[in-house]
Image (cartoon, helix red, strand yellow):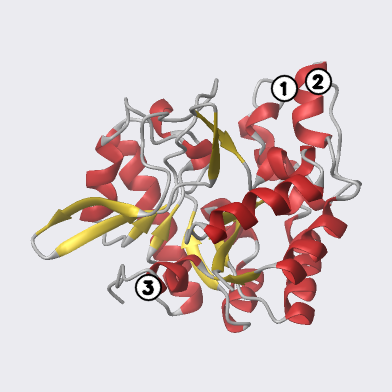
Amino acid sequence: MMINALSFDLEDWFHNTHLEKYLDRSLWRTYASRAQENTEKILSLLKDEGVYATFFVLGQVAERHPDLIKKISEQGHEIATHGWSHTRAYQQTPQEFEAELKQSIKLLESITGKKVLGHRAACFSITANTQWVIDVLMKNGLAYDSSIFPIIHDKYGMSDAPRFPYILRQQEGKKLVEFPPSTCQIFGLNIPIAGGGYFRLYPYSLTKMFISNLNRKGQPAIVYLHPPEFDPHQPKPQIDPLNKFRIYIGVKNNFKKLKKLLRDFRFAPVKDVLNNLGHTLEY
């Protein structure tokens, strides 16, 4: 069986970008964190199923829960960076982005004692207008990225980008590999198939069919999920109907879907899947 990549963006319920106009960032530190509890449930399931994953960790979560990050690493999962403050790249200057990236990498490596190889931008925010991020990632020793979503979307996406893992930049003997979030092509359009709200919204049978089709074509899928997506008891501020739908649809049954997914497909951390594809990463 094809080995697919399993990833979790480790952030808290209040980091959700669909809540940004309702919650004051300056108050984030005052909100009760549910990251530990939700992630522990995920870790327990992964252990039971014998599956290892990549956790793209937000610096602010690592700062608040260093023991959790250490535990994830000690259980054999890969720790990668999700930046520091969950600010989209196109809302930052290159200098601000780099400062937060360095801060995140330094903290994660100090907790785990292992080199951080991978990066995922908040809200997949490497777009046509933020390709400077690629140079910043290479400059700071990252080996791969998983942020360029080859779709049309109101908040992110580069619809003309490649759909499968490829080399983003290669210079001076180093390279940066991109592992784009998985899509299928229907009538010439790239449709997201394996993560986040799409995983919650689609019937599991449809997700299974999409991933199976990719695997039959010799391509691994990359699944991306978030701990709050498995938490029906998370705080629910008063928000507009569209964002309410985007955040909470399918949360109640999402854990059952994940169990099925782990039993129907083979998974490994992102770095291992890229190595299997021949994209040898520097350690």
**Horizontal arrangement in the rendering, residue 46 relative to residue 100 (left or right):** right
> Are the two marked residues, 2 and 1, in contact with CB atoms closer than 8 angstroms?
yes
- Mark 3 against mark 1, which lies toward the viewer? 3
The x and y percentages for residue 6 are 60, 63
Cα separation between marks 3 and 1: 41 Å
Question: Residue type at mark 1?
Answer: Tyr
- Mark 2 against mark 1, which lies toward the viewer? 2
Question: In this picture, is 256 found above or below 92?
Answer: below
Q: Which residue is mark 1?
A: 22
Residue 235 visible in image: yes
Cα separation between marks 3 and 2: 43 Å
**Which quadrant is the C terminus positioned in?**
bottom left
Depth check: 229 or 114 in front?
Answer: 229
Q: Which residue is mark 2?
A: 239
| Residue visible at 76% across and 66% down in the picture | 42
Depth check: 110 or 147 in front?
Answer: 147
